Image (tube, coloured by chain):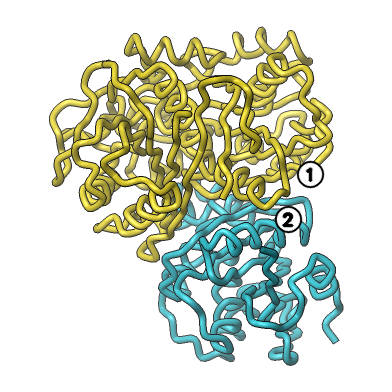
Chain colours: A yellow, B cyan
């Protein structure tokens, strides 16, 4: 398998409309989560990270007419535009567009506004993004629950390895729609406080919305310091469709396979960007899988306390933040962590710090029993 | 080294007909999806209680793979690579409807297209590579490329790939089992011919 190099990136979230703004917000410990009331859905208040429409539209006016695009499209388009601005010579005729999302424009199901019904379709979302910029190749759309964003990177690497693409823009995004709020609320999975990954008093997820994009290439770039994806694996738990395996089997196997492909051992992993949704079962499952993998001493964080769970965007955003952590040798704290509340010990990052990071591991898990592990290397 | 892969077997479920690489297996004039699914379930004598709680997309996926995997021994690292156009929209609409009264957690869990991959993995004990893709229409070139990337990299020794679409009660299922055993060539052209061929 060839390596996949991670180049320019962009994050559009409540923490800011660029990667730089997002990283500095994380460094300062700011969270995009705010108290929300939706009495028509739930009598309980809950926390979620929601992007204000008005600054989004203001930012979007520089590139398009805001009323022509849905909120999610505007977020994704802004992210892609930032990358194209930095790469004016990128040949769009041979750049693959990989879109990762769980629910896309699902908010149109309840309230289509002036948009035609077809806009609900994920294939149409891909086409809208492609047409806006003039991408020629048919978009590749990954919709694989909460591992989608990271799986998009693996898909690009896999196709690149057999010579089917040279470069790609991987774009992820999801909204805090009434649809997903109702769903997670019906599961009693929404925390009434801002989510607290791995903490004893964690009590469910906080949702978040965001879009992210990253340019990835197969050929080694000329720049001196690069981050490359060198190992990737997904393994299904084959256990339960809405609950994780108690033993963390699928995640454990994903980690083992990704490390094996990268030809490195657990002890070489300097930093672990975990999933950490703050549900009782997910975090417990991760602790089992990490412990079985010998990762109990590896510094790790979950970014869900900053963003909430951004679903199909989360693993992409977290990979992008990992890239910058590696380049800067910075460890960012796992926000809202209190006292360890999983049965196996973990080394949760409690304060920002510095560390030489040569290898990092990104993991994610999702409904349907899916698990993902990505190994990144600094070169 | 260039390695060749082959279509070991395939199954098609469309317009009341089910066929595989050998013959037509089942034919029904039943227009209602649930009645059709029930008649196939009974025909196959499936006896799998979990089937009853599944949504239409997962039921179709289980029936298709059941037919394929009964005829063919499967390796435990068989990857599941499915695609469709409508994602889980059929169930999304039902869940949206439920939110008018009491949002249904039993429906919500099926509002992701990859849930069927989880159901297939559970039924056949496959702890393997999974991915679900959305496309405008059946994309033979992409399925071939992505499957080959898994097979040549050694991530999987066999791949189940195909199209599993359900919209407005209309279903279109075409699943292929890909391996290195010499059989029908795993080419874009063969995939297209099989998918577009009318059931005789």
Q: Establish whether labels 2 and 1 are both on one chain.
A: no
Give the number of the disc on residue A375. Answer: none
The chain ID associated with circle 1 is A
- Can residue B157 be seen at all in this image of the molecule? yes
- Decide which of B36, A273 is in the foreground and name it: A273
* Residue at the spot 32% in from the left edge and 20% down from the top edge: A332
Q: Are marks 2 and 1 in contact (CB under 8 Å)?
A: yes
- Decide which of A203, A314 is in the foreground and name it: A314
* Residue at the spot 25% in from the left edge and 31% down from the top edge: A299
* Residue at the spot 19% in from the left edge and 33% down from the top edge: A347
| Structural distance between the alpha carbons of marks 2 and 1 | 10 Å
Helix, strand or loop status at disc 1 = loop
Tell me where residue A321 appears, x and y as whole percent: 45, 24
Q: As drawn, is B2 to the left or to the right of A243?
A: right
Q: As drawn, is A246 to the left or to the right of B94?
A: left
Task: Say if A30 sits above or below B19 in the image.
Answer: above
Helix, strand or loop status at disc 2 = helix
Give the quarter of the image for residue A358.
top left
Tell me where residue A199 appears, x and y as whole percent: 19, 33
Give the quarter of the image for residue A98.
top right
The chain ID associated with circle 2 is B
Residue identified by numbered label 1? A138
Residue identified by numbered label 2? B142
Task: Say if B111 sits above or below B198 in the image.
Answer: above
Task: Say if A24 sits above or below A342 in the image.
Answer: above
Tell me where residue A322 appears, x and y as whole percent: 42, 27
């Amino acid at each position: 398998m060839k390596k996949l190099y991670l180049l320019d990136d962009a994050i559009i979230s409540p923490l800011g409309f660029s990667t730089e703004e997002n990283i500095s917000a994380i460094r300062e410990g700011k969270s995009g989560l705010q108290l929300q009331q939706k009495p028509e859905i739930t009598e309980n208040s809950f926390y979620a990270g929601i992007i204000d429409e008005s600054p989004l539209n203001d930012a979007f006016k520089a590139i398009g007419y805001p009323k022509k695009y849905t909120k999610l499209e505007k977020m994704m388009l802004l992210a892609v535009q930032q990358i194209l601005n930095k790469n004016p010579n990128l040949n769009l005729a041979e750049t693959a567009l990989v879109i990762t999302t769980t629910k896309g424009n699902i908010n149109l199901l309840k309230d289509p506004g002036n948009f035609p019904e077809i806009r609900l379709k994920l294939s149409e979302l891909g086409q809208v993004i492609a047409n806006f910029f003039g991408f020629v190749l048919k978009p590749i759309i990954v919709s694989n629950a909460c591992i989608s964003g990271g799986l998009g990177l693996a898909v690009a690497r896999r196709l690149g390895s057999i010579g089917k693409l040279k470069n790609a823009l991987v774009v992820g995004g999801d909204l805090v729609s009434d649809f997903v709020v109702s769903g997670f609320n019906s599961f009693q999975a929404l925390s009434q406080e801002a989510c607290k990954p791995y903490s004893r008093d964690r009590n469910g997820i906080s949702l978040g919305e965001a879009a992210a994009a990253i340019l990835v290439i197969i050929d080694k770039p000329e720049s001196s310091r690069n981050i490359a994806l060198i190992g990737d694996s997904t393994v299904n738990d084959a256990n339960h469709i809405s609950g994780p395996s108690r033993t963390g089997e699928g995640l454990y196997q994903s980690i083992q396979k990704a490390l094996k492909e990268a030809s490195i051992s657990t002890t070489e992993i300097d930093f672990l960007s975990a999933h950490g949704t703050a549900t009782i079962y997910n975090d417990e499952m991760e602790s089992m899988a990490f412990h079985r993998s010998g990762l109990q001493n590896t510094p790790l964080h979950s970014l869900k306390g900053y963003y909430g769970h951004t679903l199909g965007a989360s693993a992409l955003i977290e990979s992008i933040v990992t890239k910058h952590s590696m380049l800067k040798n910075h460890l960012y704290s796992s926000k809202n962590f209190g006292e360890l509340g999983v049965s196996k010990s973990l080394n949760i990052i409690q304060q920002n710090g510095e560390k030489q990071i040569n290898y990092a591991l990104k993991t994610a898990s999702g409904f349907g029993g899916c698990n993902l592990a990505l190994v990144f290397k600094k070169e | 080294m260039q390695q060749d892969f082959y279509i070991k077997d395939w199954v098609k479920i469309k317009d009341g007909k089910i066929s595989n690489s050998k013959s037509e297996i089942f034919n029904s004039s039943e227009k209602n999806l649930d009645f059709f699914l029930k008649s196939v379930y009974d025909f196959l004598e499936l006896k799998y209680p979990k089937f009853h709680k599944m949504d239409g997309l997962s039921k179709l996926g289980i029936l298709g793979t059941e037919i394929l995997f009964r005829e063919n021994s499967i390796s435990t690292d068989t990857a599941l690579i499915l695609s469709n156009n409508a994602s889980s929209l059929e169930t999304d609409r039902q869940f949206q409807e439920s939110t008018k009264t009491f949002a249904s957690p039993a429906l919500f869990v099926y509002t992701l297209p990859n849930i069927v991959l989880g159901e297939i993995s559970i039924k056949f004990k496959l702890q393997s590579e999974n991915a679900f893709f959305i496309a405008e229409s059946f994309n033979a070139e992409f399925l071939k490329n992505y499957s080959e990337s898994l097979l040549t990299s050694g991530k999987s020794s066999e791949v189940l790939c195909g199209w599993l679409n359900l919209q407005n009660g209309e279903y279109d299922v075409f699943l292929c089992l890909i391996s290195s055993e010499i059989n029908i060539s795993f080419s874009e052209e063969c995939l297209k011919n099989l998918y577009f061929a009318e059931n005789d």
